[in-house]
Amino acid sequence: MSLYAGSPAPMFIAPTTSNPTFGFSSVGGRWALLVFLPPPGPERQAALGLLEAHPEVFADPAAPRLLFGVLPDAATFAAVRDNPPAVRWIDDTQGDLRRLYQAVGSDGELAPQWVLIDPTLRVLETAPLAEGARILARLAALPDPADHAGAPMHAPVLIVPRVFEAETCRRLIDLHHREGGAPSEVMREQDGKTVGVFDDLKKRRDAPVTDDALRSALRARIQRRLLPEIEKAYQFHATRIERYIVACYDAADGGYFRPHRDNTTAGAAHRRFAVSINLNAEDFEGGDLRFPEFGPRTYRPPTGGAVVFSCSLLHEATPVTVGSRYAFLPFLHDEAGEKIREANLHLLDETAAPQA
C-alpha cells in the first residue's frame, strides 16, 4: 500500500553519508524525490542509469529539487557519497524507512518505488520504480517552489507591534553588551537524552536575563500586550514563559540560524509558540525570519514588536549582512505543555536545561 497523494510525508531522522542524524523535516520549501532502491541488480542499475542520464534535474545551485536515494544494503551505502544539498544517500539496512513510507509489499518485502514530495512536505505522487522516466519528467516540469501553490502563500505568523518600549529594548541590548553573550547551542537527541551541542546550524551569541526585577517587567509586558493577541489569533491560552535570553546575530561572523523546528526533541516537545521580539530593527540588514514551506517571503517585526509562530513550523533566521541584530527570544506553552515538560525532565541533559 502506498501513501496517498496529499498526505503528510512521514518525518524521519536517518543516517546519510554526510550526516549521521539527518532530519528530513528540514527540507521544506523544495521539491524532494525519494527513491527506494532494490538490492544490487538490473532493476537498480536501470534506475541509477536514468538518474545519471538526467543530472540537470538536480543541478540547480539553489537546490529547488532534492534527491534522496534510500539504500537497503550496507555495502552500497558504504561506497556512495552525498552531494549536499541536492543529493543524499540514506541507510535503510534495517528497513525502518521503507516500512514508514509503506514501500513494502503484502509479504513485507521491499517494494522499490519513487515518492515525490512537495515544498510543504506533502506527498505529491508515488510510483513503481519502472515509471522513473515519467517521474523525472514531471519533476523537471514542476514550477519554482515559490509558485507551487498557484497563489501567493503567507506563513501563519502573527506580528504584534509595541510589546516592548524603546527604553526596554535599549536596556536589553545594553545587558548583552555587558555580558558579551556566549555561543548558542542547538538541542539534539543523543543516547536517549536531549543535549545542547555546537554545530553549524546556528551562529549566535546569547545572554541570559537573570535579574528578577527585569524578568518580572518583561513578563508583565508580554502578559498584557502579547498574550491576548495570541489568544485572539490562535485560540491558545499561554500560561508559561520558557527562557529569558537576549540573542545577537552579528554580521561580523555572518550570524544565522538555518532551517529548523523548535519542538523536535523530547526536551522541547512541550513548546507551543516561539516569540521573536526585535530590539533594533532599523540597525541591521539581513537577519529576517523565513518559513521555507510557505515561500521565500521574509518577516521582520518593528523594534519592540514580536513575531509569533508555532514551534512546529520550519523556520530560519537569514544571515545578518550589516550590523548586529538583537532579539528577545522566549517560548510559550500552557499547563498541558507543562505536564509534558515535567514528564520529559529525565530526558533533558542538565547542561541543556532551558531557563524557566
Image (cartoon, grey):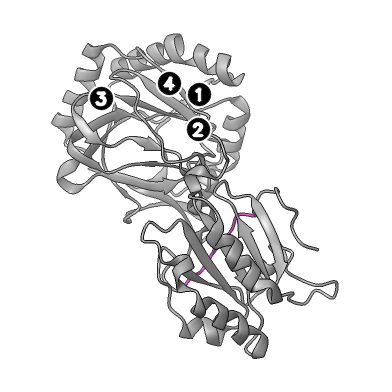
Q: Residue 89, relative to residue 174: is it above or below?
A: below
Instruction: Using the rendered view, name the quadrant where residue 288 is placed.
Output: top left
Return the disc, 3 or 2, that comes first in the chain's sequence: 2
Q: Which residue is mark 1?
A: 240
Marks 4 and 1 sit apart, C-alpha to C-alpha, by 20 Å
Q: Quadrant of the N terminus?
A: bottom right
Marks 4 and 3 sit apart, C-alpha to C-alpha, by 13 Å
Give the magenta part as a residue range.
10-16
Residue at 54%, 39% (x, y): give it: 312
Give the side of residue 237 with respect to residue 286, left or right. Answer: right
Give the side of residue 157 with respect to residue 110, left or right. Answer: left
Where residue 285 sits: x, y (%)?
A: 22, 34
Q: Which residue is mark 3?
A: 281
Q: Secondary structure at mark 1?
A: strand
Q: Secondary structure at mark 4?
A: strand
Q: Residues within 10 Å of mark 1 (few under 14, many from 20)?
A: some
Q: From this viewpoint, is residue 20 visible?
A: no
Q: Which mark is residue 159?
A: 4
Residue at 59%, 50% (x, y): give it: 121
